[in-house]
Amino acid sequence: MGAILVIMFVVFVAIGVPISFALGVVSFTGIFSMSAIPNTVVFSKMFNGLNSFTLLAVPLFILAANLMNEGEITEKLIDCCNALVGRFRGGLAYSNVLVSMIFAGISGSSQADTAGVGKIFIPAMEKQGYDKGTSVGVTAASSTLGSIIPPSITMVVYSGIANVSTGALFMTGMVPGILLGLAMMAVVKLYSRKKNFPKCKPVAVKDIVKLTFQSLPALLTPIILIGGIVSGLFTPTESAAFACIYALIIGIFFYKTIKIRNLPRILIETMKLSSLSLFALATANALGELLSYYQLNVFVQNFFANMPGGKLVFLLVVVAFFMFVGTFMDAVPAMILFVPIILPTATALGISPIILGLIVVVTLALGLVTPPYGLCLLIASSISGITIEDAFKGTLPYFLSSLAVLLLMILFPDLWLAIPATLFPGLF
């Protein structure tokens, strides 16, 4: 029966069935075939999987991002970043990465980053003379930072699965997230001469100051959110709620760009986008029950226990595995299914669950730009109107730079714990 279920899942994915439905059908079929397990287990596991205060942060961060986009706050950030770095060759590409780094500190969602930032940057870059591959590649690759630089929805989900401190995981991702952004900027620098990237007209200092002041409420958002979490003022879920209220207030009263009549539409869009991740998470919980019946966790633990090479080989295999999984599955269901399986082995090898979380989150974030499932790649390519193949070619140099940073995380895992160990000494 197990082989039939695997074949079913592969066929569903191959013909384009949404991953959440594929997981649900396979789960129900597998459990239905077992007389020892009541069929109602599928629905109870789905419900219990979503019955979490921590997971409430997922729709709230998506709502915050939608409010930022609706309130034209994203445009303010773009204008400010363009004024700062636009004068350099490849200025719009630099600005694209910089905006994604800042937006990541607000939304926690890579997809929201791609949609919000991409619809402005991709047409602007093409109009200025960038080729479509570069415009899409920079946008899609830099939007992955939304899952890494805190606050991060995927980190919230992982912390709930692995029962680790969300604040500590956020702080662990801060430096690697910045390094990933700098690595992408290094690629822009490398290609700026080779492809003769254009540059914008210099902006006067007084205009830079003016634009910075206009963007200040948005620029302060990451500081307020992360500061509140680290200080213990509020939980990640409460910070997501605060981000929504904060975005709503500055959109209505400061920028005066959010209209009350548009709020129902924003809420409906948020529910539609949130339901994609949350339904996949629910069905992944049901499939997790099925996998536990087949004792897949025991098989994986025995596999790694007999593998030579220790921590390094384990982490390399984890990266390779999640890189493969990320090509056809979203990060949330992938973590729900497989993190509980690999976590005991990682702990037995002396690998911190927080380091494991960082590496898993970064790897799955890169899966957002790998075909055929990469959501960020799909969104960015649809904005530009190019094929997935051409979009991935444009993304590849930035993807490879991210892989190099990921390799550093694997080679020096304890290095990234310095900041959380200082801020959360009781956890280490």
Image (cartoon, grey):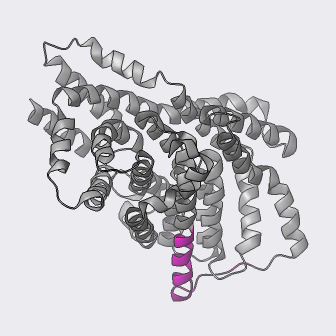
The residue lying at 35 percent from left, 15 percent from top is 44
- Is residue 371 visible to the viewer in this orientation of the structure? yes
- Determine the main secondary structure of the stretch shown in magenta: helix
Q: Where is residue 7? Give x, y as percent.
A: 14, 39
Q: Where is residue 207? Give x, y as percent.
A: 87, 69
The residue lying at 30 percent from left, 61 percent from top is 312
Near-viewer residue (297 or 243): 297
| Quadrant in the picture for the N terminus | top left
Q: Is residue 88 left or right of residue 383?
A: right
243 w.r.t. 382: above or below:
above
47 w.r.t. 364: above or below:
above
- Is residue 384 visible to the viewer in this orientation of the structure? no
The residue lying at 64 percent from left, 43 percent from top is 65
The residue most toward the right is: 206
33 w.r.t. 243: above or below:
above
The residue lying at 36 percent from left, 36 percent from top is 336
| Residue 76 falls in image quadrant | bottom right
Q: Where is residue 285? Give x, y as percent.
A: 34, 28
Q: Is residue 406 left or right of residue 231?
A: left
Near-viewer residue (271 or 227): 227
| Number of marks in picture | 0
269 w.r.t. 85: above or below:
above
Q: Which residues are magenta?
A: 182-200
| Residue 188 falls in image quadrant | bottom right
Magenta run includes residue 225: no
